Amino acid sequence: MILDLDQFIQRERPFWDELQKLMRQREAQPDRQAPLEEVQRFLYLYQRASADLVKLKTFAGDVEVRAWLESIVAGAYSQLHDRRAAGIRFRPWNWLMRTFPQTFRRHWRAFALSTGTFWLGGLLGAIIMFWNPELKTEFIPSQFSHVYESPSKRVEREENQEFDAFEGRQTFSAYLMANNIKVTITAMVLGITYGVMTIVVLFSNGLIIGIIGFDYIADGQGVFLTAWLLPHGSWELPAIFIGGQAGLVIARAMFGWGTNLRFRQRMARIRDDLLTLVGGAALMLVGAGLVESFLSQYHGPKLYPWKIAFGAVQLLVLVAYLGFCGRGKEPEKPEKLR
C-alpha cells in the first residue's frame, strides 16, 4: 500500500482542525454540558485522528505534522479520560444557582404532570368528604390519628398548648426531614414501574391532603389550616412534586419514546438530571422540616397572619428561583434522544 502523504494530509486535516476546535471549546467552557451529538462527534474525530497518527508513523510521514497530530490526540485522550482535564467538578454555588433550576425547567412537563396528579387526588378527597364525612377514618393512615378528632377541638387544644421552648424540636425536625426525603426518593425510584407507582404515591398523598383540607375548611378552620400548612408546605409539597417529576423522567426513559438508544444509554443520559432533581428536593425538604418543627407547630391567632405571610413569601421566592435562576445560560441539550 502506497500512501500519498500530501493528499492524505490534505484530506484528513479538516477533521484534525475540527477536533482541535472542539478541544479548545471544552477548555474555554469547562462547565458546559455538551449535547449528545457533540460528544459522539468528538469521539469519532478522536478515533479518526488516532488512526491517522498510526498511518503517519507507519509510513514515516512529515515529522512536524506527526508531532502536531500526536499533541492533538494526547489532548483529546486527556479530555475523554481525565475528569479534571474535562473540567468536571462539583461547584455548589453553580449547581444551586444554575444546574438545579435549569434541570427543573428542562423537565417541566413531568413536574406539571406530577403536580396535577397530586391535586387530582386532593380533589377526589374533597369530593369524598363532601359526599360522606364519615369515610375520613377509612382513608387517613394511623400515624395521622390526630385528624380523627373534630378540627375545632384540635384547634382549641393547640391554641391553648403552652409554649415549650423548643423542647424536643430538634428530634422532631430530623424525623420530618428523613420521612419527607424518603417519600420523595420513593416517588422517584418507583418510576421504574413505568411511572404507575409514582402516580399512585402522588395521588394517594393528594387524597389525604384533600380530605384533611376539606374537613378543616368545612368546620370553619381555614385560617388555622393555612397558617399550619403554608409555612412548611410552600417548600415541602413542591419538593415532593419534584420527586414525582424525577420518577416520571425515569418512566419516560423506560418507555424509550422518541429514541433508538438502548435502555442503558437512556438511563445514563438522565442520571445526572435525576441526581440533581432529588438533591434539590432534599435541600428544600431540610428547610421545610426546620420550618415545620420550629414554626408551623406553634399556634395562636396572633401568629397566624405572620405565618401565612412567611409561607407566601417562601412560595414566591421558590417560584422565582425555579423559574428564572440560570436563564440566559441554559445548557445546550437536544430535546429528543436519537
Image (spheres, rainbow, N blue to C red):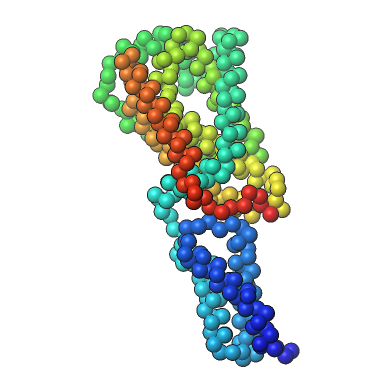
Corner quadrant of residue 192: top right
- Residue furthest left as drawn: 165
Relative to 230, is 107 above or below? below
Q: Position of residue 268 (x, y in %)?
A: 59, 53
Q: Quadrant of the C terminus?
A: bottom right
Corner quadrant of residue 199: top right
| 284 lies left or right of 214 | left
114 vs 25, nearest the viewer:
25
Q: Position of residue 327 (x, y in %)?
A: 49, 46
Q: Quadrant of the N terminus?
A: bottom right
Relative to 191, is 72 above or below? below
260 vs 306, nearest the viewer:
306
Is residue 7 in sight in this rendering? Answer: yes
Corner quadrant of residue 139: top right
| 186 lies left or right of 7 | left
Relative to 240, is 49 above or below? below
231 vs 209, nearest the viewer:
231
19 vs 244, nearest the viewer:
19
Q: Residue at x 57, y 27 (%)?
A: 118
Q: Residue at x 60, y 24 (%)?
A: 120
- Residue furthest right as drawn: 1
Is residue 173 in sight in this rendering? Answer: no
Badge count: 0
Q: Position of residue 93 (x, y in %)?
A: 39, 49
Q: Residue at x 60, y 38 (%)?
A: 109
Q: Residue at x 32, y 32 (%)?
A: 170
Q: Position of residue 158 (x, y in %)?
A: 35, 14
